[in-house]
Image (cartoon, helix red, strand yellow):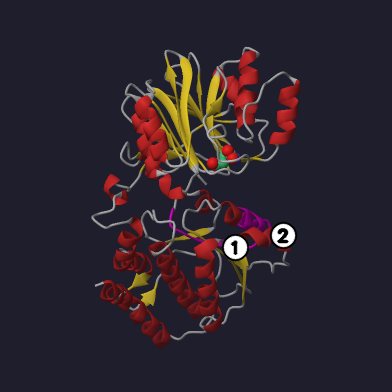
Amino acid sequence: MCGICGVVGLRHATPIVFDGLRRLEYRGYDSAGIATLVDGKIDRRRAAGKLDNLGALLETSPLPGTTGIGHTRWATHGAPTTCNAHPHGTERVAIVHNGIIENFEALRRELEAAGQVFQTETDSETIAQLVDYHLAQGLAPKDAALKALQRLEGAYAIAMIFAEHEGLMIGACHSAPLAVGYGDNEMFLGSDSLALAPLTRRISYMEDGDCVVLTPAGVEFMTFDGTPVRRAEQTTALAAGAIGKDGYRHYMEKELHEHPLVIGQTLQRMIDPANRKVVLPDMPFDLATVPRAVITACGSAFYAGMVGRYWLESIARLPVDIDVASELRYRDPPLAHGSLGLLISQSGETADTLAALRTLRQNAVHILSVLNVEHSTMARESALVLGTVAGPEISVASTKAFTAQLTVLACLTIAIARARGALDPLGEEELVAALLDLPSRAADVFA
Ligand code: GLU
């Protein structure tokens, strides 16, 4: 999923948004764009290809203004062209969107019949046209946005700005992450805390079905029917430095060298070194009596799960099924009541793994998630989270996050094996001693 960055404040918005998009580059994208308010009117610059293309365009054709939104697109509907690049909009509103609007065809037909004129092939433009339609009917920006949000189906994170409304930005999300950042006389929206890291460490994570109205003075959260809600402000541990390359040539090299630290930090959470025992947080269910486990994940996390299956079956003697998360729903497996659902995700936002989590939960499966981002949507919906302490992983090829997942799965295997009587205290001591040796062995490999 690609990136959103937005700001309302007193400073020039474009450089802030552009730098935010740079920090989101790691997610992959095929085009990019920024829209701001210039003398109350919406203006935008968009370019296919790398952010450098957008940067070059902004050099020759600067975009002033203090209210701005930007986007890196990963096309799902419509070719990766400049015309289909976000922000989309009309004279009244500009939007950026991550995700997919599932009912866009029906909405588009309805809006075209009502006289709205579309310019792109994207599903996302439907949002802009729907909001525009309500603005044209005389609704204020917040009301027009809420009315539009009530019609959207699918997964989305959205940021919007409105002509003649300096210092106003509206955000919304459903099954896609969006974070609000608090500054001094300025407020930010970002796809994740990395996008906002150098700007502020004061962040609120939006929840599914949240809308937020931002002005330089503050924020107002509400549900799509306008009911006010509160979202806690948190301080992220993320320092701007955590996302630099630290002298390495590229992020993957840096992240490989972080292995000893990451394994050590992750073990520290789960091991009592003095007694050579695994100590997990209190379980909301009994590990001794789960009849079987279902592991599900996507990509590299799925590979970690495949290793976990070997360990759980051979050491803990627990029968394990494993599915790629995108398949689990469609396979519709018969699930033994009270089974253990073991979900693995770096971000905790992987859409297919989240959907699998919800399917498992509906089937009375106990949900235990292994996540790197412990304030993510999956974390909120799990009975228990075991955290990997891998820090941000910018490289698309997973390295330290994968190893940290294995570290957690190893500790969990020991705990389950002990609970099921498959491992005696001496056996546990031996395995824990081997795990405690891991950080220094990793250091030897990288030395
Ligand atoms: N579905 C939208 C598009 O194709 C947004 C894709 C994205 O998340 O970048 O434009």
- 10 Å crowding of disc 2: few (<14), some (14-19), many (20+): few
Residue 360 magenta: yes
Query: Which residue matches tag 2?
Result: 330
Q: Is residue 242 left or right of residue 164?
A: left
Q: How many marks?
A: 2
Q: Residue at x 33, y 76 (%)?
A: 438
Q: For residue 91, what is the image quadrant?
A: top right
Q: Are marks 2 and 1 in contact (CB under 8 Å)?
A: no
Residue 236 magenta: no
Front residue of 51/305: it is: 51
Image: magenta residue range: 355-373
Mark 1 Cβ and ligand 1 under 8 Å apart = no
Which element carries disc 2, helix, strand or loop?
A: helix
Q: In this view, does 277 lie to the left or right of 27?
A: left
Question: Marks 2 and 1, Cα distance to the nearest angstrom?
Answer: 20 Å
Q: Say above or below: 142 vs 18.
A: above
Q: For residue 445, what is the image quadrant?
A: bottom left
Residue 4 visible to an observer of this rendering: yes
Q: Residue at x 63, y 41 (%)?
A: 77
Residue 208 visible to an observer of this rendering: no
Q: Residue at x 30, y 68 (%)?
A: 260
**Which x, y percent locates residue 396?**
44, 56
Q: What residue type is labelled 2?
A: Tyr
Which element carries disc 1, helix, strand or loop?
A: strand
Q: Which amino acid does label 1 sit on?
A: His
Front residue of 257/224: it is: 257
Query: Which residue matches tag 1?
Result: 366
Q: Which residue is drawn at 48% across and 75% down?
A: 413
> If the image is split into quadrants, where does the C terminus sit?
bottom left
Front residue of 372/67: it is: 67
Q: Which of marks 2 and 1 is nearer the N terminus?
A: 2
